[in-house]
Amino acid sequence: MNRFTFGAAVAALALTVPAIAQAQQLPPAVVGVVDTDRIMRECTVCAAANTQLQAQLTQLQQRAEALRTPIQTEGQAIETALRALPQGQQPDAALTQRITAFQSQQQSAQQEIGTRQQQVERNVAFVRQQVGQRIEPAIQQVMQQRGATIAVDAGATLAISPTVDITPAVLAVVNQNTTPLNVNAPPPQQQPAQQQPQQRPQGR
């Protein structure tokens, strides 16, 4: 083989090697299915946290009812007083002041319940975040033990075979961490106020 032919053969081999490497098939995927919703309900610390969250929701509902009852009673009384006025007559100063106080009370109650509801929603999200931080390494551990290469959530599947369901194993690993979950989310971070640029004194 002359030099030109040998060089052409080497060049051709260099072009075919990457093509062969790219054509190599991936190994068969080993799928494990995890029901994360079940873990968030049934893990030991999750159940305790869910009980506390339910108590927070019950307190919110009780507070809303405690505020709603007197406001509803006062609103009906004001409506009755307004209907009793002669046609075309405006409310006197006392009734006007009463209406203003009622509106202020109603607005204050709405703000209070809205703030408490947002806090409960943040608490729920905070608990789910903490559970997620425990589930992820547990899934990785069980995948390694079972030889799985892919883990999918049960909520994203249409049908599950018990042979690929690794939820009980993941749940057991999660339950090894008995540190209670924090059911009180930190306050939301406030954006720092933008400083207004200082105006330079104009020269005379």
Image (cartoon, rainbow, N blue to C red):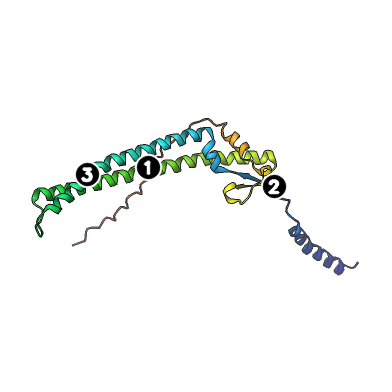
- Please rate how many residues cluster around mark 1, counting C-alpha atoms within 10 Å: few if below 14, some from 14 to 19, many from 20: some
Which residue is label 3 attached to?
Answer: 73
Dot 3 lies on which element? Answer: helix
In the rendered structure, the answer to whether residue 168 lies left or right of residue 5 reads left
- Please rate how many residues cluster around mark 2, counting C-alpha atoms within 10 Å: few if below 14, some from 14 to 19, many from 20: few
- Rendered location of residue 153, percent (x, y): 59, 47
Residue type (three-letter) at the residue carrying disc 1: Gln
Identify which residue is drawn at 26% across, 42% down: 69
User: Residue 55, labelled with which disc?
Assistant: none
Q: From the viewer's side, name the closer residue of 133 and 75.
A: 75
Which residue reaches farthest bottom?
4
- Please rate how many residues cluster around mark 3, counting C-alpha atoms within 10 Å: few if below 14, some from 14 to 19, many from 20: few
Q: From the viewer's side, name the closer residue of 87 and 204.
A: 87
The CA distance from mark 3 to mark 1 is 28 Å
Which residue is label 2 attached to?
Answer: 30
In the figure, residue 135 lies in which quadrant? top right
Q: Do residues under tags 1 and 2 come within 8 Å of each other at their CB atoms?
A: no
Residue type (three-letter) at the residue carrying disc 3: Thr
- Rendered location of residue 29, percent (x, y): 70, 50
Dot 1 lies on which element? Answer: helix
Q: Name the image quarter holding the N terminus.
A: bottom right
Label 2 or label 3, whichever comes before in sequence order: 2
Which residue is label 1 attached to?
Answer: 119
In the rendered structure, the answer to whether residue 190 lies left or right of residue 175 reads left
Vertical placement of residue 58 versus 156, above or below = above
